[in-house]
Image: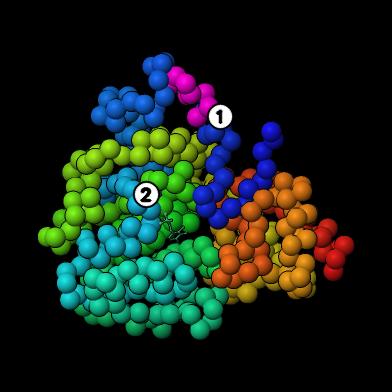
């Protein structure tokens, strides 16, 4: 069975080189006669794999020494609760910027624990814009400021890092982590579910400045504290070993591809040509303001929505899969994470142009 071009928003495509390595490592990983799924997480082979994954990620993202890298479970959604439980006290005010469905969910959860000040909100634009930084109403006393640098559903992305003074900046980078270099030191905490740009679902990455780690509320369950994971090498209990191992293979693969500078170049090119195709036609359109278009998730609609089923059917027939847009937005969405090769984007563009010629 040959591989297709998978434009899924998540769980998303993994690099073929990584899948081949996984296949080679089954049924005997490191000549052990066992797979990585069947060995102790406290054995030396797995510890070495776990530590290498962390080191490769540190190298890729140039993570400063005063930051811890934690491998957790529960997805980004669990971070919506862990962030307030660990970084705020009851009665504290926290600042959130609402730019789409994911920040909205993060806000909903934070409201259970804190006073949430919505410092800026683009809901009136149907989340097709990111409010200009000089319009944000940050509160003086906020325990932290939370942003969602890439909104996976509407396809809006920050192309700046906001200036929030001495407040910790917290960022949900689930869908754009590792897509380009970022200055980690500008953030207090970065979190990301794995299943977009890191690896299989089931593992969640947290990169946190060390001085923010030991401030959880006393009643916080142990497994919801950063402290427990930071003090145990993320082995407070059995970690998702297989997902951790695959994430490590992805980090190694990204290093071999030349690191985040090289990836940013390809990702920039992929997005640019896809948006250019959409913008140059009256058959396709994308409603997002140009200054904040996502390089990872490209939603677009057809002028005639009645053609949507035919578009999807013909795309699938030539191996362009999972292009259906999120139900809240409609139309199409092409997620073009690191593992989507430029050839896949070229194939999508050729198909779109051809489809327009036949149906426009
Ligand atoms: C996918 C996604 C989430 C949810 O991730 P889970 O791992 O399913 O909890 C949260 N935030 C963003 C930006 C996402 O893209």
Q: Residues within 10 Å of mark 2 (few under 14, many from 20)?
A: many
The quarter of the displayed image where residue 360 is located: bottom right
Left or right: 30 as drawn, with respect to 110: right
Residue underneath mark 1: 20
- Contact (CB < 8 A) between labels 2 and 1? no
Residue underneath mark 2: 204
Q: Residue 3 at x, y = what percent?
A: 66, 38
Q: Earlier in the sequence, mark 2 or mark 1?
A: 1
Left or right: 106 as drawn, with respect to 216: right
Judge whether 314 appears above or below 53 on screen. Answer: below
Judge whether 345 appears above or below 125 on screen. Answer: above
The quarter of the displayed image where residue 83 is located: bottom left
Tell me where the magenta segment starts and ends, as one range: 22-30
Give SS at disc 2. Answer: strand
For disc 2, does the CB lie below 8 Å from ligand 1? yes
Residue placed most toward the observer, 28 or 97: 28
Judge whether 337 appears above or below 245 on screen. Answer: below
Which numbered disc covers residue 340? none
């Amino acid at each position: 069975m040959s591989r297709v071009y998978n434009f899924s928003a998540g769980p998303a495509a993994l690099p073929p080189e990584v899948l081949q390595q996984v296949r080679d490592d089954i049924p005997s990983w490191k000549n052990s006669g066992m797979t990585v799924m069947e060995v102790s997480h406290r054995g030396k082979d797995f510890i070495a794999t776990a530590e290498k994954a962390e080191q490769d990620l540190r190298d890729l993202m140039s993570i400063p020494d005063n930051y811890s890298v934690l491998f957790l479970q529960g997805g980004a959604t669990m971070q919506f609760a862990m962030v307030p439980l660990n970084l705020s006290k009851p009665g504290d005010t926290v600042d959130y910027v609402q730019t789409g469905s994911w920040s909205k969910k993060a806000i909903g959860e934070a409201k259970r624990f804190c006073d949430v000040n919505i410092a800026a909100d683009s809901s009136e634009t149907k989340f097709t814009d990111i409010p200009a930084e000089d319009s944000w109403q940050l509160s003086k006393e906020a325990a932290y400021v939370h942003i969602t640098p890439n909104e996976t559903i509407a396809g809006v992305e920050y192309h700046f890092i906001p200036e929030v003074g001495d407040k910790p900046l917290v960022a949900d980078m689930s869908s754009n982590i590792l897509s380009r270099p970022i200055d980690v030191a500008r953030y207090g905490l970065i979190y990301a579910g794995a299943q977009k740009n890191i690896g299989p679902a089931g593992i969640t990455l947290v990169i946190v400045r060390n001085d923010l780690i030991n401030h959880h509320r006393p009643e916080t369950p142990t497994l919801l504290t950063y402290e427990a994971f930071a003090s145990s090498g993320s082995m407070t209990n059995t970690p998702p070993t297989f997902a951790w191992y695959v994430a490590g293979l992805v980090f190694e693969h990204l290093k071999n591809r030349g690191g985040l500078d090289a990836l940013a170049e390809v990702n920039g090119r992929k997005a640019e040509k896809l948006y250019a195709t959409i913008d140059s036609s009256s058959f396709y359109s994308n409603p997002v303001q140009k200054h904040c278009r996502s390089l990872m998730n490209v939603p677009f609609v057809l002028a005639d929505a009645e053609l949507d089923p035919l578009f999807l059917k013909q795309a699938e027939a030539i191996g362009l899969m999972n292009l259906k847009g999120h139900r809240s937005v409609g139309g199409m969405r092409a997620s073009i994470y690191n593992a989507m090769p430029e050839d896949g984007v070229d194939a999508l563009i050729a198909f779109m142009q051809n489809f327009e010629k036949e149906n426009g």
